[in-house]
Amino acid sequence: MKRCVRNLLAGAFALAAGVAIVAHAPEAAAQAGGATVEKGEDMRAVYAGPDDIAEGKAVADGACARCHGARGMSSTPGLPHIAGQRAAYLYVEMLAYRSGARTNEAMTAAVKFLSDDALVKVAAYYASLEPAQPVAVRAARGAPSKSDPVQAGKAAAAACEGCHGGKGVTSIPGMPNLVGLDPKYLVVAMKAYKSGDRKEDMMKSAVAALGDADMENVALYYALQKPARAQTPAPGNQAAGKAAAAACSGCHGEQGVSGSPANPSLAGQDAQYFATAIQAYRSGTRSDATMKGIAEGLDERAVKDLAAYYAAQSPQAPKVRVPLTTAQRVQRCDRCHGVNGNSTDPRTPALAAQRLDYLGQVLRAYKTAARKHSAMAAMTDGLSDADIDGLAAHYARQRARAVVFVTLPCK
C-alpha cells in the first residue's frame, strides 16, 4: 500500500515517544540540488526508533555538540540551535556539506566521514529534542519601530516642519519644498550639508545627528507625501521662464519633473530658494561644474523668470516602492516557514526561537548571495539592515514547537 507523509504540530517530540519519522530525498538528488530540498522533489519516509535515536545521540555528541551545544542548544554566536529542527532539513543540509554543495570547513570536517545512515540518525536525534525557548528582544521604550522606516522617517522629520512645513510643503520663502524629490537625491543633499560640501550652517546643524539610515527614512517619508506646490510668492515672467527652461529639461525633465535621482525635480519649488541655489552655484558655495557654467550665463531677470515658471508647475510623486512592515514581511516568510516560524514542511527549517544573531547572519548571507537559494535570494532582495534586524527579532521571540510527521494511506 502507498503511504503519504503528513504532519502534526505538537508541543514536544519526546525521545521516550519511541519513533521519529524522517522524510528525505535520495542522496543523489540532494547533492545535485544543493543545501535545501526544493518543493516537488521526490521524497520517501524513513523511520527511526528509540535505538536509532540513541545511536544518533552518540554520533552527535562526538561530531556536533562542540559547536552546536549539548542537546542542540548553541551558546556560540553565529551558530544555530538545532534542537527540535526538522529532521529532513537537517539531513539534507548535512548531505550538502558532505558533498561540497555547501562550503564550511568545520561542518565538512564534522560530516565527511559519516554514512547516510548515521546522518539520518543524527537528524532524527536532534528532531526529537525539545526546541529552544524564545528570547526577549525589546525595542527602546517610546522609540518608533526600526522595522517601519516610514514611521521612523516621520518621527525624525518632525524637527524639519518649522522650516519646511507640514509634510514637506513650505510656506516660508527661501525654504525649499521637500515633496516630489527622489529620496536618493534628498539623501545626497542631506549628506552634502552634513559634510560641509553645501555651505549652510543651519542645515549642517539640523542633520548633524542623523545617521545614514535616519536620512534614508526621512527621504522616504517625504517621497511618499502628496506633492504640492510651495505656498510662497513667485514674482517673475512665467512665459519667459518657460522659454529659458527648455535648456534645463535634459537634466531636470519636462516641466521640471526629473526622471533621474541624480537631478532634482524643480516643479513646484519655492522661487526664492531656487534663486538662492542658482547664486550658490555661481559663487561656488555649491560645487557642480555643469551648474556653475549654467548659472554664470543667467542674469537676475532670467533667474527670477525661471523660478516663477518652475514654482507654477505641478510636482509629481517620485516612483518609490512603499516598503513592507515587519508584520507584512513575516506573513510572506510564514508561507514557507510556518506560522510564527514553526515549519510544518519537512524540507523547510523552523525559525521560531532561533538565535537572533544567527537569523540576521543567514538573511544577510542570502541577500549577498554568499549563501545560495533562489527563493531566499528573491525574498531578501532589497531588505535593509533594519528589515533584517526586525525579522530576526520577530522569529527569535516566537515559541518553538516540534513537529511530528504521520503516515496515512494515500487516497
Image (cartoon, rainbow, N blue to C red):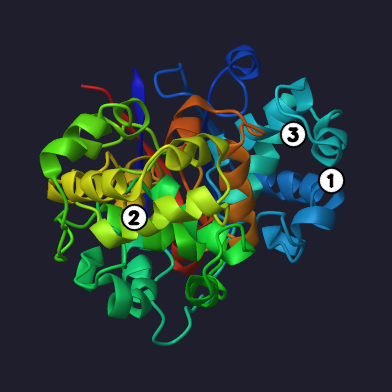
Whether tag 1 and tag 2 are in contact, CB under 8 A, the answer is no
Q: x, y (%) of residue 147?
A: 41, 63
Name the residue that disc number 3 marks.
118
The vertical placement of 393 against 182, above or below, is below
User: Front-most of 46 and 1?
Assistant: 46
Name the residue that disc number 2 marks.
275
Residue at 28% over, 43% down? 302
Density class for disc 1 (Cα within 10 Å; few <14, some 14-19, many ≥20) is some
- Looking at this rendering, what residue extends furthest in the bottom direction? 141
The answer, for residue 295, to whether it is visible in the render is yes
Q: x, y (%) of residue 101?
A: 70, 22
What is the secondary structure assignment of the residue under circle 3?
A: helix
Point out the frontmost of discs 1 and 3: 1
- Tell me the number on the disc at residue 63: 1
The vertical placement of 33 against 91, above or below, is above
The answer, for residue 82, to whether it is visible in the render is no
Residue at 39% over, 74% down? 156
User: Amino acid under label 3?
Assistant: Ala
Whether tag 1 and tag 3 are in contact, CB under 8 A, the answer is no
